[in-house]
Image: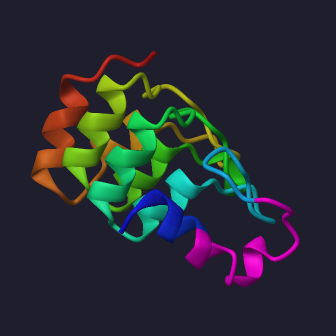
């Protein structure tokens, strides 16, 4: 799926109906961006395409979740690693007082916990 196809699909979703023109930097009614949505959908290819297109990898979405929070919540270590390499902050704190680093250290996934051990909390 291309970014354009994804954005067109998003226009049909309730959370985006209030929004005027939707682009890669837009936020839905809860605050999430297309990057958050791609991560929640576990679409690694689209996630990479959005990052390469210049989205903010530290943008805040619903409840202050950053894209890295989402990757950790999904236990998607590959995307967490990718986002961190693109400048995502392991130390960003959401509205629950949790950082992606703290969540990764407590993950069920051994790969995610191992990734957290080497993460820099920037």
Q: Position of residue 23 (x, y in %)?
A: 67, 52
* Residue 76 relative to residue 61: left or right: left
**Most foreground residue, 60 or 90:** 60
Q: Is residue 15 magenta?
A: yes
> Tag count in the figure?
0
For image coordinates 57% across by 33% down, the residue present is 56
Q: Quadrant of residue 8?
A: bottom right
Answer yes or no: is residue 75 visible.
no
22 vs 76, nearest the viewer? 22
Seen in the picture, residue 67 relative to 28 is either above or below; the reply is above
Q: Position of residue 18 (x, y in %)?
A: 88, 72
> At 58% across and 66% down in the image, what residue appears?
7
Which quarter of the figure is the N terminus placed in? bottom left
**Residue 21 visible here:** yes
The picture places residue 67, in percent across and down from the top left corner, at 49, 46
Q: Which residue is pictured at 29% across the width and 24% down the height? A: 85
Q: Classify residue 31 as left or right of residue 115.
A: right
**Residue 33 on the magenta segment:** no
Residue at (30, 42) in percent of width and height: 80
Q: Is residue 91 above or below residue 82?
A: above
Asked which colour scheme the image uses, the reply is rainbow
What span is in magenta?
Answer: 8-21
């Amino acid at each position: 799926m291309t970014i354009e196809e994804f954005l067109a699909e998003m226009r049909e979703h309730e959370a985006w109906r209030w929004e005027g023109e939707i682009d890669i930097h837009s936020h839905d009614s809860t605050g999430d961006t297309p990057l958050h949505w791609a991560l929640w959908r576990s679409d690694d290819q689209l996630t990479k395409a959005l990052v390469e297109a210049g989205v903010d990898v530290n943008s805040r979405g619903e409840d202050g979740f950053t894209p890295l929070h989402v990757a950790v919540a999904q236990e998607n270590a590959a995307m967490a690693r990718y986002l961190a390499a693109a400048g995502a902050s392991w130390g960003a704190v959401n509205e629950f007082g949790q950082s992606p680093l703290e969540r990764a250290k407590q993950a069920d996934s051994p790969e995610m916990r191992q990734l957290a051990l080497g993460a820099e909390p920037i």
